[in-house]
Amino acid sequence: MKLTFWGAAQTVTGSMHELTFGGHNYLLDCGEFQGRRKEAAERNRNFPFHCGDISAVMLSHAHIDHSGNLPLLVKNGFRGPIYTSPATADLCRPMLSDSASLQEKDAEFLNKRHMRRKSLNVAGIAANGIVEPLYRVEDAEATFPLFHPVPLHTPTRVGPGILYQSFEAGHIFGSTCMLLTLESGGRTVRLGFTGDLGRPGLPIIRDPEPLPPPDYLILESTYGDRVHEPIHSVAGRLTEVVNRTYGRGGKMIVPAFAVGRTQQLVLLLHELINAKAIPAFPIFVDSPLAVNVTEVFRKHPELYDAEAQTFLTNHEDPFGFSRLTYVRDVNQSKALNDLRGPFMIISASGMCEGGRVLHHLKNNVGDPRNTILLAGYQAENTLGRKIQERREEVPIFGELMRLRAEVCQLDALSGHADREEMLEWMKPIVGGLKRVFLVHGEPDQQAAFATAIRDRYQLEVAIPARGSSFEL
């Protein structure tokens, strides 16, 4: 039994861990690495194993940094099943299709620029100088038949001697932690994997569940040295930002993940407008992907928490109200740049690495009346991180833009548990743990979290580097 860490190892994105057991190879997640363009292209294109040798994938959730390289895995020869929750399987259809479409458009843009400049040093350039997308829409479509939805808590045999069982992770809609039970030669080993662990009390989704006790645990560590503001502070913080920007006639640009964060913000704004805590001002969700994803949310009301269920009880749509407009058409999106404030645009991507939000940022970062509201984690080297750091100038479409808009952050709405929440979640299972592997975190967060785990629970903690292997 061997575990090898290929992604989200001493970094936050690109979750991918390989389990070798009983002569078979399995992947836990197959995510897209996000960061500097050249490094991301090289890492995403080049799998460190033969894709056809992977027997199955167990997918924790639909975020692109966990699922986004599945189409390339398939393109390179993978034909096995992808086990995940029903909601995650439904979400991956629009998300992977959208990712493929963005890959194609990105390649088209770079090729046009290359023709103008006649020089381009980007990984993925073919011999003729043409940039190839990581994968295409047809590769995403070839991936969908491989999904095997498995309801939560249902033990499922995914290979000889290996049982998969999933539990609510409370991170995004359909997100799961998983327990793998490995049996060989009369020996049983239980391996837990959190995927991304959410916070108790987040809007819409249910709270994280404890795992049955594992022997080994792969644990995320995104906020391993941080304690978030209480969840109940979100409404007050959002009210302050909206009213302040509204008062100066500004626009609010909210880069938000199409899955989870967009729907949570819409529900919160709905509640605040109903309570007359904020004006009934225009709100635009400008993301075809977010529109499609919201339909998946509507399809799975069984996953709603009590707060979201209240809307259904009152015969209201949690994700629709009179001042809210969902924008699909690109011309409608462009027209938003000609509107006068105050209004809000919620648009993907959440880390400002692509999508329509880039156009809205380009048109609005230079005006001090406006607000950029960051509602999620901003990974190292992303445009979102540069905005979060309030740099004087930020690069958008290759052009440095003066950042004069107000920058605000809603940390309390984070879909990732903080240090204390993760330590509390671990508490029921520490008795049988032999070792904890920390993934999905930047090195300083991981080092601090490892110390906290050792101090509180006296457990052995490893922080794997990319390519590190461990025998279980």
Image (cartoon, rainbow, N blue to C red):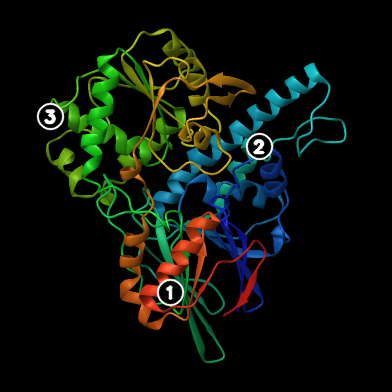
What's the mark number on residue 136? 2
Numbered circle sitting on residue 454: 1
Query: Which quadrant of the structure image shows residue 122?
Result: top right
Q: Residue at horizontal 25%, vertical 47%?
A: 231
Residue 423 visible at all: yes
Residue type (three-letter) at the residue carrying disc 3? Ala
- Mark 3 or mark 2, whichever is nearer to me: 3
**Element type at mark 2:** loop
Q: Is residue 180 above or below residue 100?
A: below
Contact check, label 3 and label 1, Cβ < 8 Å: no
Which quadrant is home to the N terminus? bottom right
Q: Are marks 1 and 2 in contact (CB under 8 Å)?
A: no
Asked which secondary structure carries label 1, the reply is helix
Judged left or right of residue 198, residue 14 is right
Residue at image coords 57%, 80%:
472
Q: Tell me if 457 is positioned left or right of 356 in this view.
A: left
Q: CA distance from mark 1 to mark 2?
A: 45 Å
For mark 3, does the 10 Å Cα neighbourhood hold few (<14), some (14 to 19), or many (20 or more) residues? few
Q: CA separation, marks 3 and 1? A: 45 Å
Q: Position of residue 2 (x, y in %)?
A: 62, 76
